[in-house]
Image (tube, rainbow, N blue to C red):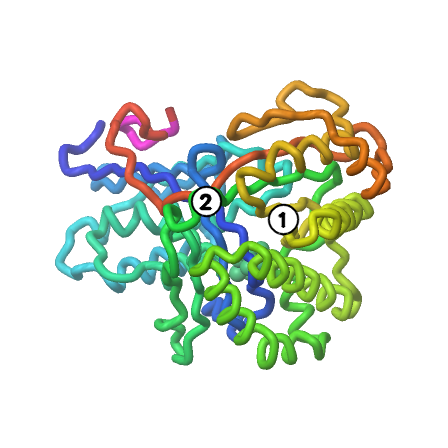
């Protein structure tokens, strides 16, 4: 039976896409990065994690469900987040000794290979912080779940400063500009049809730190200036510079992945074809109008401004024809237009195999985690069991 003391809270949290990549750890246990990173937070309207947590004296054991499946609670990263939350809580709180039910789900297909751990841990920590009345910065707690999760704790444009303290308490995220600062910014995620990831980012970056010399060079000599320059470009809304740094940084991360031994290959021929198309388009336009960035997988994340979306998505649709139009376009509405003949000729557009892309998600920059106050939205019932 539900206890009248039980506390329940539901939060949603966003995905973020880095333009200066986090790649490599200084401390594997504390998830302290080798270098600073910077990202855009995506709107929770289309891609988000949602988590309900109940804490109650009547719960017999800790339970955790993710996307409809019960998971083991014996998870080091989950445990580290919980420990850190409890350490920061008022030690007199009776709920510190009660058991928890946690239920989390993503509204975007995990099968699409899109990073879900950042949104998931940001959501978990946001909900825990409300339940246990934690004040102050909690991005360093989200970091303990997944490094990049600390950036999902804020909306807009977010800088994760690696910090200098050995305990990682100053390795935190900070918003450098809100979502409203650059309202025309749009994001297209081109989901590339491919099997499962061969090696996740945790494993890839660990092997990189062990075997790549470039990774140390990047952290020491390249990233600090890029962070400064891209922050400036964002502040000035200078898309041309923003795009160049974004693409160079994605390429450098993947260069390090190839410099890793044995190499980590994340981009496929289709990923490279997308990057090539972006460069051809930008050179036709005379300045950068689209920027690509790739995480630890083949999907392309494109940053572009609203006036460019219709033309560029029409080109993508021509070059990579969908096999099944059902559910192919997701997110904000998209319209198409005929591609002018001179673009077809100058870009030397070659059509790829039907179905090379699985879907296209159209979204924008958005806000950080939010509490859902409508109790009908809880993922758990009064007994702490998924609805
Ligand atoms: C390529 O945050 O998933 O997306 O800290 O080991 O959980 P862990 O890694 P994770 O790494 C993300 C790496 C990236 C680049 C980025 O988001 O900055």
Residue in the picture at 42% in, 80% down:
164
Residue 373 occupies quadrant: top left
Residue 132 image position (x, y, % from top left) = 22, 51
Q: Specify start and end residues of the magenta stretch as a single range.
A: 381-386
Observer able to see residue 29: no
Residue in the picture at 48% in, 70% down:
32
Residue in the picture at 65% in, 80% down:
217
Observer able to see residue 6: yes
Of the four image quadrants, the one with ligand 1 is bottom right
Residue at the spot of label 1: 289
Q: Main secondary structure of the magenta part?
A: loop
Residue 254 image position (x, y, % from top left) = 71, 62
In the picture, the quarter occupied by the N terminus is top left
Q: On residue 385, which mark appears?
A: none
Residue at the spot of label 2: 365
Residue 253 occupies quadrant: bottom right
Would residue 18 be found to the left or right of residue 300 on screen? Answer: left
In the picture, the quarter occupied by the C terminus is top left
């Amino acid at each position: 039976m539900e206890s009248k003391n039980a506390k329940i809270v539901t939060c949603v949290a966003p995905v973020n896409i880095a333009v200066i990549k986090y790649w490599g750890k200084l401390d594997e246990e504390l998830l302290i990065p080798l270098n600073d990173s910077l990202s855009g937070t995506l709107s929770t309207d289309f891609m988000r994690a949602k988590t309900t947590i109940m804490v109650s004296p009547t719960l017999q054991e800790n339970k955790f469900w993710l996307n409809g499946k019960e998971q083991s609670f014996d998870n080091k990263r989950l445990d580290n987040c919980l420990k850190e939350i409890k350490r920061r809580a008022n030690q007199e709180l009776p709920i510190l000794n009660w058991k928890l039910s946690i239920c989390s789900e993503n509204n975007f297909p995990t099968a699409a290979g899109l990073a879900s751990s950042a949104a998931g841990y940001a959501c978990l920590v946001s909900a825990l912080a409300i339940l246990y009345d934690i004040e102050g910065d909690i991005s360093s707690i989200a970091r303990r779940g997944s490094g990049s999760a600390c950036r999902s704790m804020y909306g807009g444009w977010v800088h994760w400063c690696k910090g200098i303290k050995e305990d990682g308490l100053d390795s935190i995220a900070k918003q450098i500009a809100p979502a409203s600062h650059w309202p025309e910014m749009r994001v297209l995620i081109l989901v590339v049809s491919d099997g499962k990831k061969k090696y996740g980012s945790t494993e890839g970056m660990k092997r990189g730190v062990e075997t790549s010399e470039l990774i140390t060079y990047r952290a020491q000599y390249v990233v600090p200036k890029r962070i400064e320059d891209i922050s400036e470009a964002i502040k000035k809304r200078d898309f041309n510079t923003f795009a160049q740094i974004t693409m160079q940084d994605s390429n450098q991360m993947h260069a390090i992945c190839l410099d890793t031994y044995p190499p980590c290959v994340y981009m496929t021929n289709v990923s490279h074809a997308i990057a090539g198309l972006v460069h051809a388009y930008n050179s036709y336009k005379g300045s950068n109008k689209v920027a690509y960035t790739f995480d630890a997988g083949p999907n392309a994340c494109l940053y572009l401004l609203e006036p460019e979306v219709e033309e560029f998505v029409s080109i993508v649709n021509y070059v990579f024809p969908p096999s099944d139009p059902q559910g192919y376009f997701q997110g904000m509405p998209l319209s198409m237009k005929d591609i002018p003949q001179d673009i077809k000729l100058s870009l030397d557009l070659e059509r790829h195999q039907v179905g090379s892309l699985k879907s296209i998600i159209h979204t924008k920059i958005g806000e950080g985690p939010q509490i859902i106050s409508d109790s009908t939205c809880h993922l758990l019932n009064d007994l702490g069991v998924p609805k």
